Amino acid sequence: MCKNRQLGYDPTIRYSDLKNWEIDVYDSETQLTRLYVCESIRCNPHSTFGRHTRCFVAYEKPADSTSANNGDMPKVLIKDAWAQTLGPDGHVCDEVAYLREIRDTLADDHTLDNMYPRLQAGGVVQITCSDGVVDDTTQYILMHIDTNTQAKVPVRVHKRLVTSPVGEPIHDLKSIDELIVVVGDVMAAHSAIVKRCGLLHRDLSVNNIMFCRDADGVKGMLIDFDNACRVTDVQNMEQPGCVGTLPFMSIGNLEHSKVKRTVLNDWESLIYILCWIGTFGINQTDQDCGAVRDLPIQKWQTGSAADVAALKRQYMHEISYFVEYILNPISQVQEYQNLLKLLLNLRASLFDNQRVSPSAQGCKKSLPSWAITMGISQPEVPTPSDIQFLDRDVDPAITDSFARRAEIAGVLADELLEVTSKFRNEALDRIRNTK
């Protein structure tokens, strides 16, 4: 007969005599276990396999509590997931460690309060069994199974973390102006995390942008650092992995490109997120889903990675394609005009930036080695020798536009942040003026 641990029994989540679910969270920093009471389930896993992520809205149970009613306790979010120890490109996956570093590094910057999940506790789930207290991992669960079978199962570690505040999904926003404010906040936090913590998020998506609402309005929050990686690590990868959420992944990610990944990949993802929201609506009630059913953007979630990359190359390389196939449906909604302007500005700053040489604009690829061997050459473009070009010091032999921009990613990211900050402040003024 199998033991409880082999059947997946988890004694750290249990139904109490007070008719509520209690959840133990072990904190690897203090080496203490804290007890939380579940108030509601925020999300359930969609598959039996994989990370099997679950999220709970909860509050910490006071030591002397004998009542089930603790409605005044501060709410937190508990994330429970079976995370892989290594990502597809070999990087270390440790969301708890990354969130702890973000919290400690940005603690004194109150302009970023509530713009990222503030870690309260977290670590590997601890199971008490006949072997003592052990880490809950697939290796431990399968330790008595033959090694050939074990080798076929990805190594996963059961982690649980507690963060605050509890954000709301962006489909609960009330207007495009609120969305623009949230995006400005999220990218401000993203920029600070890159520059001051040296961490790249790598999975910007509709579901990883949340918001909080209080008497002063909305504030955006960037969540889910499961796929985060140190900037230095990701830049040194010979073959960066394909990381992210398919409709929002950058072209380089989709193509498994060897071009080094930078902060610009996340900014590119933001453009696709805003295109998606503009097409399908913030909450799918302010757009006609039937009218957009056959639009090319639908293929971003149904096509292969290579097909999606090819479509995005076409739309992003030429402004005419971007306007016709992506922006035209968005332009039909009067309330979305400011989103339209934001998208045009972001695309211009990333793909058509006039401060970089023509070689660094658009979505141009380097020719494959066989084509060069046959004497096929790239079209003639001005060399980036003019002092005005930001990429003037980049090797002229680098002809891939993404690779050229990657060499000056920090400067371009600062310009993109100026765009979102400007639009955020203007949207905030419009919101205040309508009150």
Image (spheres, helix red, strand yellow):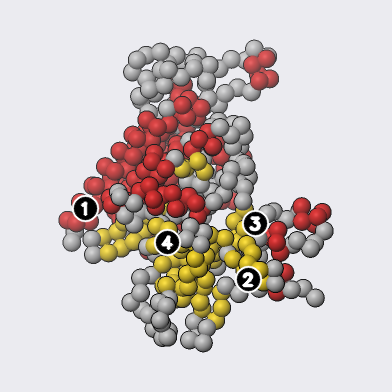
**Cα gap from disc 4 to disc 2, whole angstroms:** 23 Å
> Considering only order in the chain, which callout, 2 or 4, is on the residue closer to the N terminus?
4
Q: Is residue 142 left or right of residue 387?
A: right
Question: Residue 430's mark?
Answer: 1
> Considering only order in the chain, which callout, 1 or 4, is on the residue closer to the N terminus?
4
Q: Give the number of the mark in front: 1 or 3.
A: 3
Identify the residue at horizontal 40%, vertical 32% (top origin): 410
> Considering only order in the chain, which callout, 2 or 3, is on the residue closer to the N terminus?
2
- CB-based contact (under 8 Å), mark 3 and mark 2: no
> Considering only order in the chain, which callout, 4 or 3, is on the residue closer to the N terminus?
4
Where residue 154 appears, as percent x and y from the top left, is 69, 54
Tell me the crowding category of disc 1: few under 14, some 14 to 19, or many 20 or more residues within 10 angstroms, Cα based. few
Q: Is residue 256 visible?
A: yes
**Cα gap from disc 1 to disc 3, whole angstroms:** 47 Å
SS for tag 3? strand
Question: Residue 156's mark?
Answer: 3
- CB-based contact (under 8 Å), mark 1 and mark 2: no
Q: Give the number of the mark in front: 3 or 4.
A: 4
Q: Quadrant location of residue 342?
A: top left
SS for tag 1? helix
User: Which residue corresponds to mark 2?
Assistant: 128
- Residue placed most toward the observer, 272 or 23: 23
User: Which residue corresponds to mark 4?
Assistant: 120
**Cα gap from disc 4 to disc 1, whole angstroms:** 35 Å
- Residue placed most toward the observer, 166 or 383: 166
Q: Give the number of the mark in front: 4 or 1.
A: 4
**Which amino acid does the dot numbered 2 rest on?**
Thr
Where residue 45 appears, as percent x and y from the top left, is 58, 65
